[in-house]
Image (cartoon, grey):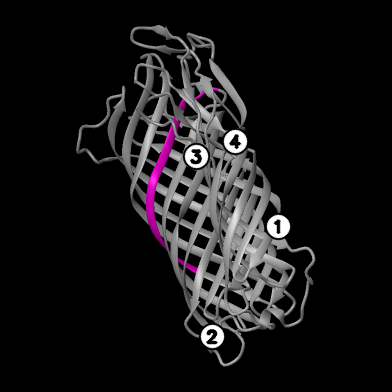
Amino acid sequence: MYGDVVGTPAFLAGGQIGSSWQKDRWVLGLELAASNTVSDGTNTCLAVSGIVVSANCKAGPDFFVTGTGRLGYAFGSQGHTLAYLKGGVAWQHNSGDVVNGNEFRSEIYPFGLAPQNGVRFDYGRVGSVFGAGIEQALTPAWSVNLEYDYLRFGGPRVVTPPTLQYPPLAAIPPSATRLASSYHISKIGLNYHFGADPRTPGWSDTPLSTTNPIFGTPPIAFAAGWSLESGTRLWLSRGRFQWENGPPYLVSRLTYHKLDGISGELFERVDSPWGIFLKGNIGFGRFNSGQANDEDWGLMPNFLAYTNTSSGVNGKFEYYTADAGYDFLRGSTYRLGAFIGWAYYGEKSDVKGCVTIASLRCLAPGDERTVGSQDTDWNALRIGFSAETMLLDRWRVSADVAYLPWTDFQGRDNHLLRDLTTYIDHRGSGGGGVQIEGALSYLITRNFSVGIGGRYWAMWSPRDSEQFSTQAKQQYTSPVTSGPYPANYRMERWGTFLQASYRFD
């Protein structure tokens, strides 16, 4: 009826080793890679009816190994750029659990009407991997690659926990289901080629195309002195925010999804003669066609096993990043550096209308009054890598990958349909996240370029996050705050952007 697909935003870090053979422009290779993963994801599962207490499914893949063959073609006048396809076998380790929602706990029944039932899974599984990428030689020994991989796995059969239904009050025996998983993974990699000269003066300054270059001299994509690049972006994106009142058992969850928006953005990067750089962006946007699902489990005293309502969502969002870094590999046609910085993402949503999916009666069809609102503010520390290189005389590719080792979240959920003042404050500090983006740019002149790119952001709070509930007990009285109660929060936003920029040397 609802749910069953668990998204697991993840950050991967690992290494690879391989060997390649080249004949003319064709390159054939074998590669073995291993990656450790930081990930987190939960969603509703086993929701078959409003009279049955459904479950919360959690998944957390934490390790991948791939063995692949690679076929590529080297292009450009010197064959420094390799486009390739790859495929082979993959292995993953995954763990998680399936835990029933609230089974009618209340002041009268503090332990519920049944023991809290759940099952845990922990397994490794062999699957398949397919991918494509571009690798650019920086020197004879060093290269950088950008890659997309798709991994697919089957999974074991898992016995689902026994649960309750009402009405009539009855126990539902365990059943079984089968797990399956698939992953979309983007990578940036730095490769060292054994047996090659690590540095050859002027090697990267050779012409990038066999025709006359658009500039009268070899392309100086990245100046040796001071440089400022300034530009604008238009980001078409989709967002998601989820918070749940729970662990260890789930009481309620609100999911804001399909938040399709458009934002305008300014970005800049300043480079110094010493390899130190500063970069950042700031953007503002809106979304008008989102959806919110409000779920509850085991509501007393009415014995509502599972409720789910759907509403429309519109709102606005804003964000910025600010980084400082150092290019440890740098030439006239490439640069590769590490950075540390800060990220902020804020979102304000209004929830309109209310349509019943399970159990709880809501508003009449066509009633689009505002029933709630949600404010969210995320701050995070960023640590990552930034790479840019020329592919051909006019084409430049760039990528940023950042791991967020610490996040701080604050938010407020307002319930406006209730007769008495009710709102919930959110707090969560110490979570994690990932931010990655890549762009392909075309140099119209030496200094002016246009491009297209993609971006994915995800942040989540730790599982010991908190919420504080504020509610008026009766009319004309001051609201009373209670808590903290356990909670969990996570967000995602991803999409495609168009950009234009000008560089001042």
Stretch in magenta: 249-266
Of the numbered discs 1 and 3, the one sitting upstream in the chain is: 3
List the residue tagged with mark 1.
19
Circle 1/circle 4 CB separation < 8 Å: no
Which amino acid, by three-letter code, is at mark 1?
Ser
Separation of disc 2 and disc 3 at Cα? 42 Å
Of the numbered discs 4 and 2, the one sitting upstream in the chain is: 4
Report whether 298 appears left or right of 153. Answer: left
Q: Secondary structure at mark 1?
A: strand
Separation of disc 3 and disc 4 at Cα? 20 Å
Q: Residue furthest front?
A: 23
List the residue tagged with mark 2.
446
Residue at 60% across / 79% down in the picture? 228
Of the numbered discs 2 and 1, the one sitting upstream in the chain is: 1
Q: In which image quadrant can residue 44 be found?
A: top left
Separation of disc 1 and disc 3 at Cα? 34 Å
Percent x, y of residue 103 = 47, 15
Residue at 59% across / 25% down in the picture? 121
Report whether 199 appears left or right of 87. Answer: right
Separation of disc 4 and disc 2 at Cα? 48 Å
Percent x, y of residue 238 = 41, 51
Separation of disc 1 and disc 4 at Cα? 23 Å
Which amino acid, by three-letter code, is at mark 3?
Gly
List the residue tagged with mark 4.
126
253 in magenta: yes
Q: Secondary structure at mark 4?
A: strand
Q: Is residue 255 visible?
A: yes
Q: Main secondary structure of the magenta part?
A: strand
List the residue tagged with mark 3.
7
